[in-house]
Image (tube, helix red, strand yellow):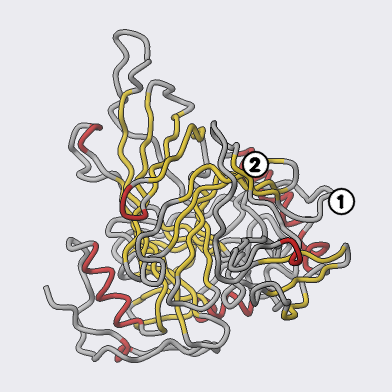
């Protein structure tokens, strides 16, 4: 934890330099992508297409590479990524000056049977600041230009492999570094307007004789990021503007994070830019005591608490929302890099390790919080929904506005 906080604090010290390089968006002739110009040159980020990389044998052998427009075959869709970062991965060191953008190594890409309906999923390693980070990248066809990423997983897990499954799903395999006989197998499955992640712990078949699984599965920390979603990302706006578009559900109803009680960041001076207002915050559920924030923490705990473990953001134009949800998280976090953390428990809690599952959902849809809660309830039937009558169809304001009690909906059992 000490090393994690040191790394995160290093990110804070380099924030101002990165903010000075916030991109200016312009339309490009490459399949309607947007170009992001920084001081060190042009990069492209595709708003809506995944290309099939030239796959070779072995993990990491398929590369996502940029192709000049004049050399592209007719109808060939190429994904070209930009670093439109006003905030970066949670524990990354400061950017190396010579690096202009991320390198993408494609590990696995799903064969999407319904690309106009289902999200398209692929697993990549993204090179940022001299290191590769395992990402599950998801393109949602019903939300214009919406690609989000999930760092799977932040913490003491080693990515081993990934492979496509039927129905547009992928399977991702990790090793628990603390208990190397333990493998974590995650299935990432597309649904209309959603992606579901389910993990299970299994014993490595090649583990030494007599090896057993630990009584408790490894803690998983999925870092969900909106860096590559141009309509949702913080850049080029000030980061507090992004915070004002983020939301959760409190006793007041749908609540913008900027309208919650946000405590100052302990490791920053009280008068620092990042504390006026605080740029990051952690939240706990109603009925649980609010933990004391350590003096060396990268973020503080708010006194405002959530009623359902759902956290998300509204698009800049106010037309769409995206969220991450489950039925058991005891901590929600909005962090530095257009990212949010909403990690569930392994359930059932008292079951043997092999019988427990870790499940969450990622959603992108029209700006309708009632529809969001109804959809989350379909995927997590044990989730207790708030009981207040309200119709579906209301939207969350994209500006900083406090929603009242009447924003709830009544979700049928």
Circle 1: element type: loop
In the rendered structure, the answer to whether residue 299 lies left or right of residue 165 reads: right
Q: Which residue is mark 2?
A: 132
Q: Looking at this view, name the residue that lies furthest to the top.
A: 209
In the rendered structure, the answer to whether residue 344 lies left or right of residue 101 reads: left
Task: State the image coordinates of residue 59 (x, y, percent, origin top left).
Answer: 54, 34
Residue 317's place in the image compared with 84, above or below, is: below
Q: Nearer the viewer, residue 143 or 377?
A: 143
Q: Looking at this view, name the residue that lies furthest to the front.
A: 74
Q: Which residue is mark 1?
A: 97
Circle 2: element type: strand
Task: State the image coordinates of residue 147 (x, y, percent, origin top left).
Answer: 53, 66
- Tell me if mark 2 has few (under 14), some (14-19) or many (20+) residues whose alpha carbon lies within 10 angstroms of its own: some
Residue 224's place in the image compared with 193, above or below, is: above
Taking the spot 49% from the left edge, 45% from the top edge, the residue there is: 108
Task: State the image coordinates of residue 160 (x, y, percent, origin top left).
Answer: 49, 32
Distance from Cα at disc 2 to Cα at disc 1: 17 Å
């Amino acid at each position: 934890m000490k090393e994690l906080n040191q790394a995160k604090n290093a990110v804070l010290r380099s924030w101002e330099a990165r903010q000075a390089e916030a991109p200016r968006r312009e339309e490009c002739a490459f399949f309607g992508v947007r170009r992001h110009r920084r001081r060190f040159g042009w990069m492209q980020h595709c708003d809506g297409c995944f290309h099939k990389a030239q796959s070779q044998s072995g993990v990491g052998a398929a590369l996502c590479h940029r192709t000049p427009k004049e050399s592209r075959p007719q109808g060939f869709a190429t994904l070209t990524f930009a670093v439109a970062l006003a905030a970066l991965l949670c524990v990354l060191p400061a950017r190396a000056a010579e690096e202009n953008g991320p390198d993408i190594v494609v590990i696995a890409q799903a064969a999407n049977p319904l690309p106009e309906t289902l999200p398209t999923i692929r697993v990549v390693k993204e090179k940022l600041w001299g290191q590769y980070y395992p990402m599950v990248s998801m393109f949602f066809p019903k939300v214009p230009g919406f690609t989000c990423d999930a760092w799977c997983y932040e913490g003491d897990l080693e990515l081993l492999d990934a492979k496509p499954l039927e129905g547009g799903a992928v399977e991702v395999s990790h090793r628990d570094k603390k208990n190397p006989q333990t493998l974590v197998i995650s299935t990432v499955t597309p649904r209309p307007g959603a992606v579901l992640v389910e993990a299970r712990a299994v014993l490595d078949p090649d583990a030494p004789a007599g090896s057993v699984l630990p009584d408790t599965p490894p803690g998983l920390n999925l870092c969900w990021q909106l860096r590559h979603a141009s309509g949702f990302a913080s850049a080029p706006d000030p980061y507090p503007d992004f915070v004002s578009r983020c939301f959760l559900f409190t006793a007041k109803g749908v609540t913008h994070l900027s309208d919650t009680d946000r405590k100052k960041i302990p490791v920053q001076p009280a008068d620092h830019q990042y504390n006026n207002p605080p740029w990051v915050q952690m939240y706990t559920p109603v009925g649980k005591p609010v933990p004391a924030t350590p003096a060396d923490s990268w973020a503080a705990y708010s006194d405002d608490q959530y009623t359902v473990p759902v956290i998300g953001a509204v698009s800049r134009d106010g037309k769409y929302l995206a969220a991450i949800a489950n039925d058991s998280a005891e901590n929600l976090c909005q962090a530095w890099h257009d990212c949010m953390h909403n990690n569930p428990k392994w359930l059932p809690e008292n079951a043997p390790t092999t019988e427990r599952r870790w499940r969450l959902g990622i959603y992108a849809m029209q700006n309708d919080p009632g529809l969001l809660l109804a959809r989350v309830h379909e995927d997590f039937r044990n989730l207790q929904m708030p009981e207040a009558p309200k119709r579906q169809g209301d939207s969350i304001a994209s500006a900083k506005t406090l929603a009242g009690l009447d924003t709830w909906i009544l979700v049928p059992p």
